[in-house]
Image: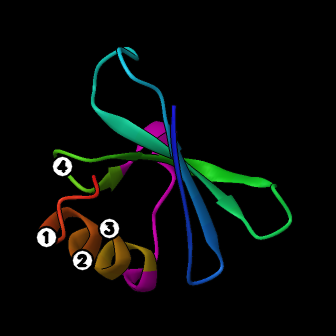
Amino acid sequence: MGKIRRSGYILEWFIGDHEPRHIHVYDSKRRLIGRLDLDRLTGVEGWTPDRKLLKLVADLTEEGRL
C-alpha cells in the first residue's frame, strides 16, 4: 500500500489492486471522495475530480511518485 498526503488530500493505492490502475482519494478527515483512474484521469463510478486534484496527480506522476 502507498499513501501520500498533500494539498488537503490523502491518496492511497494498493499494490496488485484490480484494474483500472487507480487511487483512492480522501479528504483531510479521511472521508472518501472517490477513486481516480490514473490512465484516463477520470473519476471511477461517475465521480468528477476537481482541477486541483488533477494538477496534484499530474505533478506526482511527473515526480515518479505515482
Residue 57 numbered mark, or none: 3
Query: Within the image, what quadrant is residue 6 found in?
Result: bottom right
Q: Determine whether label 3 and label 4 are within 8 Å by CB.
A: no
Q: Secondary structure at mark 2?
A: helix
Q: Position of residue 26 (x, y in %)?
A: 67, 57
The three-letter code of the residue at mark 2 reads Asp
Task: Give the Cα distance between marks 1 and 3.
Answer: 9 Å
Mark 1 crowd level (few <14, some 14–19, many ≥20, 10 Å Cα) = few
Residue under the image location 81 percent in, 55 percent down: 31
Task: Give the Cα distance between marks 3 and 4.
Answer: 12 Å
Nearest the viewer among 35 and 2 is 2
Task: Give the Cα distance between marks 2 and 3.
Answer: 5 Å
Q: Determine whether label 2 and label 1 are within 8 Å by CB.
A: yes
List the residue tagged with mark 1: 62
Please tell me whether residue 17 is drawn above or below residue 35 in the rendered image. above
List the residue tagged with mark 4: 40
List the residue tagged with mark 2: 59
Task: Give the Cα distance between marks 2 and 1.
Answer: 5 Å
Q: Which residues are magenta?
A: 43-52
Q: Determine whether label 1 and label 4 are within 8 Å by CB.
A: no
Task: Give the Cα distance between marks 1 and 4.
Answer: 15 Å
